[in-house]
Every structure is written in C-alpha cells, then in structure tokens.
Amino acid sequence: NAGVMQNPRHLVRRRGQEARLRCSPMKGHSHVYWYRQLPEEGLKFMVYLQKENIIDESGMPKERFSAEFPKEGPSILRIQQVVRGDSAAYFCASSQIGGQGLREQYFGPGTRLTVT
Amino acid sequence: GIQVEQSPPDLILQEGANSTLRCNFSDSVNNLQWFHQNPWGQLINLFYIPSGTKQNGRLSATTVATERYSLLYISSSQTTDSGVYFCASSNTGNQFYFGTGTSLTVIP
C-alpha cells in the first residue's frame, strides 16, 4: 500500500486522557500536514512538518497540542488532556518536495476522535 | 490567510445531468487542488491545477489564476459522484486553505 496511512482510524478517549494520532506519509514524501475537520465543516490547517522540523504550526492551538515528525517512524499528533471540543476527524496529508512552494497533497483516511 | 469561497453550497442533480462548481480565492496562489470527500469521509484527489485546464474522464477543471477562480465540471453525473467537493489553495506551500465545500447529491 503506497498511500498515506493513519492509525488508529477511530479513537475514543475520556476527558483528560491523552490522544496520539499517527501518520505515515506516502513513500518518497518528506512533508506532512495535519488538518482538523469538525462535523459539517471544511478542513482547517493545523501544522506542517518536514523530517525533524516543524515548518509552520500557526494553525495549532497553543496549549495541549503538539506534533512531531522524527527522522525514523511516523508523524505523531499528540493531544493532551482532551476535552469534548477536540472531538473531530483529524487528517494527515503528505507531499513531495516541490520547487517554489509547489505541493500536491495526498490525504490519509483520517482518525475519528471521540471524547466522552 | 487566503479566503476560499465555494459555490453553490448544496446541489441536487438527477443522474446524467451536468454541473459546474466554483471556487474563488482572495489572493494569488501557486497551489490549487480539488478533492471529493465521499460519504465514508475519505478525501480523494481530483485535480492539482494551479492554472490551466485538465480533464479526467467525466471530470474536468479550469483555473484562471489571474482572476482568482477555479471551476470543476462534472458531466453525466452518477450516484457515486455524491459527496462533498472541496477546493484548497496555498501561495506558500506551507498552509493550505480549504473552502467550506459543495455538497452534491445525485438522485437516480
């Protein structure tokens, strides 16, 4: 499977627990984006990473959320002390390096987070 | 950031009909993509089209970058075309801005 992989596909957490969402980019892709989609809404940019670097995290909430893309292994989006408002679908996309900011994104199937 | 507006917000078509979806963006962009989110929530790439025209089967897209809009054409619609169509744009490749989508329902 050469596509973007995300796991878990569904995640249920109680308020106050931690959620860890994983994303493996397409083979050959070194850029990863995370998005959040609330019900009946479009996708909202959260963070853009390259291997071992956060390039743009301007869409990430300042507290409780963090992201990493280590040299080895998948990208991780971590949400600490989850609250009900964190319930959403979280999508990861990957792209290749392109000159002059050209980036065609490919999306994973998403992780549906439910906070009870 | 870039404001992305899509129209119409909702569309109901009889199977076999044609349609045009529009995406306006507020600033110059060097990335523009169209996606189909199917009823299972998956986002499927339709076109990467920062400028020009492309065709893929019954779908085609045109972006007029100088006038800041893109159009997605669906011909001979099928029930499997149902879902939400999003456009997304960026002028840096760092942040992408999505529209709120066009929800398409194709009736048999």
Image (cartoon, rainbow, N blue to C red):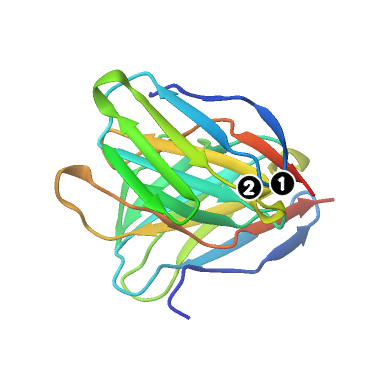
Q: Earlier in the sequence, mark 2 or mark 1?
A: 1
Write down the residue under mark 2. Answer: B77
Q: Position of residue A84 (x, y in %)?
A: 77, 42
In the drawing, what numbered circle is on residue A1?
none
- Give the quadrant of residue B27: top left
In-image side of B36 versus B97 (left or right): right
Q: List the single residue furthest toward the left.
A: A99
Write down the residue under mark 1. Answer: B15
Q: Is residue A12 visible?
A: yes
Seen in the picture, residue A23 relative to A116 is either above or below; the reply is: below
- Give the quadrant of residue B14: top right
Secondary structure at badge 2 equals: loop
Seen in the picture, residue B99 relative to B40 is either above or below; the reply is: above
**Closest to the observer: B7 or A77?**
B7
* Residue visible at 49% across and 62% down in the picture: A76
For the residue marked with disc 2, what is the amino acid? Ser
Q: Are marks 2 and 1 in contact (CB under 8 Å)?
A: yes
- Let me know if marks 2 and 1 both belong to one chain: yes
Letter of the chain that mark 2 sits on in the rendering: B
Secondary structure at badge 1 equals: loop
Seen in the picture, residue A108 relative to B46 is either above or below; the reply is: below
In-image side of A89 versus B71 (left or right): right
Seen in the picture, residue B78 relative to B9 is either above or below; the reply is: below
Q: Position of residue B100 (x, y in %)?
A: 58, 30
Cα separation between marks 2 and 1: 5 Å
For the residue marked with disc 1, what is the amino acid? Glu
Q: Position of residue A11 (x, y in %)?
A: 73, 62
Circle 1 crowding by C-alpha within 10 Å: few under 14, some 14–19, many from 20: some
* Residue visible at 49% across and 39% down in the picture: B73
Letter of the chain that mark 1 sits on in the rendering: B
Q: Position of residue A37 (x, y in %)?
A: 62, 42
* Residue visible at 14% across and 50% down in the picture: A99
